[in-house]
Amino acid sequence: MINESGEKMKCELSRFSEKFKEHFDLSIMMCSFEERSLSLIKNVERQQLGNVLIIYNEENEACRIQAKKAQEILVDNCVLLPVAINDPLVYADRVLGETSKYKEAKSVLIDVTTFTHEALLITLRICEMAFPKSNVKYAYANARQYCSDEIGEKKWLSKGITEVRSVLGYSGDLNPCNRDRLLVIVGYEYSRTIAAIEMIDPTELTLAYGKAEDATTEQDQDANAKFTDLVSSMAFAYPDINKLVIPCNDPVAAAKEIVQYVRSCSEENVIVLPMNNKLTTIAVEMAQRIEPTIQVCYVPAEVYNLENYSEPGEFVYFGEIYGAEIKERLNEIN
Amino acid sequence: MEGALSKNPFQITTPEDLTADEMISLFVDEHTDLPKIVNPGHVFIKGPRGVGKSMLLRFLQPDCQCLYFEKELSQLDFLGIYIPLKNTNFSLTELRRLEDAHACDILNEHLLTCHCCVRVFEELESLQLSKVSLEDAKKYYSDVFEPLICNYLDCEYNIEECESVKDVFGKIKVIITKESRTITQYLRKLAFQTRILPYSGALFDYIDFLLPLLEGLTRIEGMPKKTVYLLIDDAHCLNETQTRVLNSWVGTRTSRKVSLKISTQYNYKTIYTVSGLTIDTPHDYTEIDMATIYTGKEKSNYKERVEKIVSKRLKAAGVDKTPQEFFPPDKEQEKAIQEIAEMYRKRHDLGEGKGYYRGDDALRYSRPDYIRGLAGQRKASSTYSYAGFDQLVHLSSGVIRHFLHPAYLMYAQESANKKGALIERIECETQTQIIRKEADNYLFEELDKLKNGGPENAWPSSSVEKLKNLIQGLGGVFRNILLSDRSERRVFSIALSGSVTDEVKSILDLGVQMGYFHKSTIGRKDSRSGGRTALYVLNRRLAPIWNLDPTSFAGYLSITNDTLIRLIQDPFGYLRKLELKTAAFDEETEYVQLSFFDQ
């Protein structure tokens, strides 16, 4: 798969080292309860990854177990970093502290696969500050499918929300006199999305979704049918829901769509809620970099489908987040 | 009206989007407590989402007041300025950097004050100001505003250039907005700092900045002369520090000049002020619970209110039907119930009635008997129809949104069925189908997806599961009573017999907070010295799950802590035993008839 600049962005996981020959001084990953946490490191040549920082949620035993497995695979030059995932300040301070030990890193890889959206966004900003002159890239190992033991609307990834909070570092610039428009990048988690919309209770609502052909999952690409259900269920309070189509497999292209849309809403405060895959979350980070008025928020889930969240897929997406090349591409959006 | 209501007459429109004309055409003034709200004095208006708090505040804004009372701006008794707090600047994660740090209260107060000021002048700019004196407005700028802000102005503003009052207010808004951005920019810098950075911007507060600004407005010729009301909406969105700041404002005795009318849901964070004192009712503020108004003694007003609201909406949509005609009951069902009622009236005539009045038994037993009849040999409880305007009003449990939302879905369904034809009634089947689905969603999906509060008072998932058990258990018990031979079978509430454990209390409180129970008090029947105990009324939206009669309830179940624990732990096990009559149900619980004064 090739992006707008002709760059190869996707390949089979097993051929990652063959296709992308870069060596990194530092790799950062977050182990969750998903098996996918280990997809990249199982398939990449060890020497490519350099020093590895393995972040995991210290309050979740399943995450700790995955982190230990990662450590066993990597053997040496890896550091376990337990974090309180539900406290963004503590998370940020710990990651800041740890990354400051690698100031000399010239090239950094972030395995974004199983970060939470919030942790990923915070980590990206920390990397921008910690490695201002380095080349920072992402890798994302896809899922074959989500919640494989259920079909259709019975699929569930998480339930319940505890609160809505702005993401640290993405406070935006909201004008109290403007109307609030919530732009939700919709994923599979419809129940949590509806709860978030009701809790935020914006004046206007936009739902962004990806085209089936751009979906990164290998199955269940017909998210549009469920998307329609979501629109219908919100129509009582939001008769004029705007819709936005964005690519879910190319962060720069998605960032461009988001920025253009936000600029068309110049009289409104735009709050973005990313609930799709991590590639679109990277797109949100890029969009906010270009348009710092955007506020990004996050809804922590109360319960995750630990038993059956996802099945690892066979592909990896790869690209640049910070560096000369991406700067040029984002400047074009400007 | 076309602007306010799209094709579906039950579409919700946010009150902020309603023009004054639309607002007046939709607003129904069936509030026995409206005088308490419009008189000077701080007021907390509490209620669940959808009960009409924001509509009420919108009604108090000057454009609506002028239109409704046919008055000029200067003739109004108060100047109501709408201040929405559902603004995500108040929930910035960066603000947590200030907690337990130096000047946390002061900076949060500055944030809140700036927000209020910007909204005040934004609203003033939008008013009809043609009869407001430009000279006085300029004098207000130079004598009131400028002295307050001169230390922070980085350049001179030539107010003489302003050609209208709107320009003057607009200029003030620009200046305050600039200061407001200073604090948010400061907060942004705190994001990835482990130490607090010095702050060198302005610091505004209620007493020394906001109050003089608001009081000065009443001295401008053409503006209302009396009190300024800040109509503060969604105060539950504030964090704890901000809530304490707001409480400190309530605690100041300034309500003659500036009154705070604060709407909030039940999860308002605290009643403490920044100095650690509490605000108290009635001497600091009056409290109105809009849900109580509509479920308690004044519940007849609620039905009238819904009727008026629906009538207005139908009229605006061009439907020439009364609400009763638009939402007809199931005729056959009602006929069967009336036949049973007539039988009871005849029995009373023969001296066989249990009740005092002729209609007592008919009222008490006819509908439950009908439902019991369905459950008997026919095993057809689920065919009980919840159609009919009266039943729909009861099912909405005092929250207008819970009437409008199902009505919206019914209309949408009917439109889909009738493919664009004019809808002049909702078929009974559609009404019941939607109501049953909504009841299921309310119990099973809402509990799964939504919790209140933030990390400092988030509820663990085990508590939610226990609440679900308790609700299902109680629903089953009430069903059991409905199908029994008890003298009163319309039971929908429980009162606590004796003390309860902290765990049980916390589950009940969670249920109240999430709207599944309404909490009230009732006189202790077992106490010679009087006193009251808590009464928990199940939300009638849940009635269809157990095929209960939603139209009235006349009794409550006095229930012990042990029974509640059993229901929380294993509701279905308990209900099975109940059906087999192996549970000592009658010993553990006691049905109590509500007195006239309790209803």
Image (spheres, coloured by chain):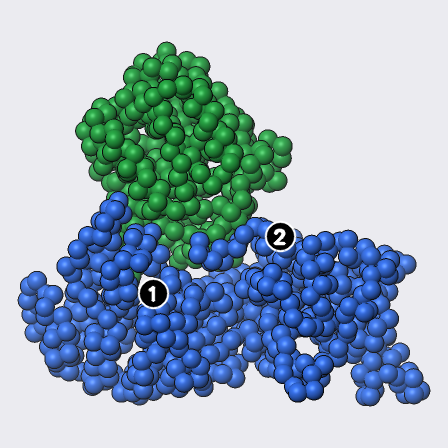
Chain colours: A green, B blue
> Which residue is under mark 1?
B242
Left or right of residue B487: residue B416 = left
Q: Which mark is residue B473?
A: none
- Say what amino acid the circle numbered 1 marks: Gln
First of labels 1, 2 by sequence position: 1
Circles 1 and 2 on the same chain? yes
Q: Secondary structure at mark 1?
A: helix
Quadrant of the drawing holding the N terminus of chain A:
top left
- Local packing at callout 1 (Cα closer than 10 Å; few below 14, some 14-19, many 20+) is many
Q: Nearer the viewer, residue B89 or B576?
A: B576
Q: Is residue A95 above or below residue A76?
A: below
Q: Residues within 10 Å of mark 2 (few under 14, many from 20)?
A: some
Q: Nearer the viewer, residue A182 or A93?
A: A93
Picture quarter with the C terminus of chain A: top left
User: Badge 2 is on which residue?
Assistant: B465
Compared across the picture, whether B363 is left or right of B530 comes to right
Among the 4 quarters of the image, the one containing residue B186:
bottom left
Q: Of the residues shown, which amino acid type is indicated by label 2?
A: Glu
